[in-house]
Image (spheres, helix red, strand yellow):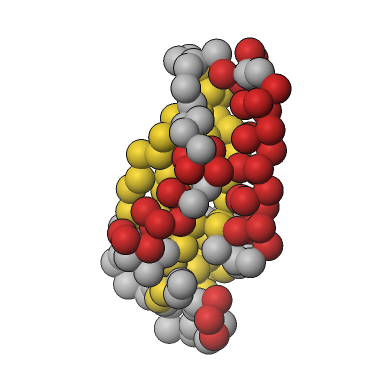
Amino acid sequence: MSARHRSGARGGGHHGDTDRGSRGRAHGDDDRGGAPVSVITGLYACELIPPRPTFMEDMDDAERQVLARHTAYWNRAIERGRAVLYGPVFGPQGAWGLGVFHADDGKDARAFVDADPAVAEGLATCRLGRLVEGARRE
């Protein structure tokens, strides 16, 4: 797993970049004058699709146990720096899960989401996509 960072945003970088090592490089303050922002590549997103729109309201005990293993899996990924963020998203069509994580390529990304207990145990499916690039506040 390697996160690839680069200095500057589309349209040019900041001449006073500070090298941040494996964390990437800052390319200036955000538009509110806050913390520097770094551009990241090598990110993938998983849209975790539950078995039904009402899943968060009516899951049974067996599903709740799988969900607990799923949460532990993503917590470990956060702790290890593999995942950037994850959590449920509540929308008009029901809840679904979002996970953003680092992967070397599509095969690595697919292996990561396929090892998620919610996917591996058949509770949910993952629609996987690659972010062309992302940005984060330092």
Residues 1 and 25: in front is: 1
Residues 128 and 32: in front is: 128
Tell me what residue is drawn at x 33 percent, y 48 percent. 129
Tell me what residue is drawn at x 37 percent, y 69 percent. 104
Tell me what residue is drawn at x 62 percent, y 51 percent. 73
Place of residue 21 in the rendered image (x, y in percent of width and height, measured from the top left): 54, 85
29 with respect to 68 (left or right): left
Residues 28 and 129: in front is: 129
How many numbered circles are shown? 0
User: Residue 4 appears in which quarter of the rendering?
Assistant: bottom left
Residue 79 to residue 32: above or below: below
Residues 98 and 124: in front is: 124
Question: Quadrant location of the C terminus?
Answer: bottom right
Place of residue 8 in the rendered image (x, y in percent of width and height, measured from the top left): 39, 73
Place of residue 130 in the rendered image (x, y in percent of width and height, measured from the top left): 33, 53
Residue 134 to residue 93: above or below: below
Place of residue 90 in the rendered image (x, y in percent of width and height, measured from the top left): 55, 24
94 with respect to 77 (left or right): left
Tell me what residue is drawn at x 53 percent, y 81 percent. 22
> In this view of the protein, can residue 5 be seen by the observer?
no
